[in-house]
Amino acid sequence: MGKHQGEIATLAGGCFWCLEAVFDELQGVQSVTSGYSGGHLPNPTYHQVCDGETGHAEVVQVTFDPARLSYRDLLTVFFTIHDPTTLNRQGNDVGTQYRSAIFYHNEEQKRVAEEVMGEIEASGIWGAPLVTELQPFEAFYPAEDYHQEYFKKNPWQPYCRVVIAPKVAKFRQAFAARLKS
């Protein structure tokens, strides 16, 4: 195969179904796994995370080829597809599990994230300050199987039609040149 060793990014920006649906289509992305990170309970269930008691956020763990997709470009997409100015919520999804967060895996990721966040703040593009947390990565717990590839498997489910499909469409428009063929 001769593929590069993938780099890993762990990102939280609301419902993991939305993030996974978008990142799955981005050139240079090798795999996307929905799961939980940033909390204190090992191996949490979806229901425990939804109750808001575990401290975990819904995240996607993205494995990508840095030769084809830089971490900076990945974060640019991330900040385009969710609202990083609403504390602990995305749309109607409310709770700490929906917070905006970047869990960096090394100092270089931390540096790039700080740069990108600074540029977004300075541009005033969102018209409000960012509330995105920047935290060192500690652990990732994959979500239950039925959450993986949720949008692909359930396109007609109401949440997918009403919330995810428009996000994916907006992403496809904005990043047409970067989509997998």
Image (cartoon, rainbow, N blue to C red):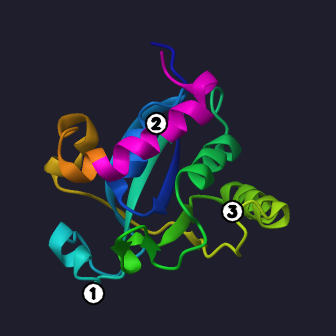
Q: Is residue 93 magenta?
A: no
Mark with earlier residue (3, 1): 1
Taking 102 as reference, is 54 left or right?
left
Residue 59 seen in render: yes
Q: CA distance from mark 3 to mark 2?
A: 30 Å
Mark with earlier residue (1, 2): 1
Residue 56 seen in render: no
Give the label, 3 or 1, closer to the camera.
Answer: 1
Instruction: Report crowding for label 1: few under 14, some 14 to 19, many 20 or more residues within 10 A (C-alpha).
Output: some
Q: Say above or below: 153 vs 16.
A: above
Question: Residue 110 — which label?
Answer: 3
- Which amino acid type corresponds to the residue marked 3 in the rendered image? Lys
Q: Position of residue 10 (x, y in %)?
A: 48, 56
Overall secondary structure of the magenta section: helix
Q: Which residues are magenta?
A: 162-181
Q: Name which quarter of the figure residue 39 lies in.
A: bottom left
Disc 3 element:
helix
Q: Which residue is mark 1?
A: 53
Q: Name which quarter of the figure residue 97 lies in.
A: bottom left
What residue appears at the point 59 percent right and 66 percent down from the top-left corner?
84
Q: Which residue is mark 2?
A: 169
- Which amino acid type corresponds to the residue marked 2 in the rendered image? Ala
Mark with earlier residue (3, 2): 3
Instruction: Report crowding for label 2: few under 14, some 14 to 19, many 20 or more residues within 10 A (C-alpha).
Output: few
Give the label, 3 or 2, closer to the camera.
Answer: 2
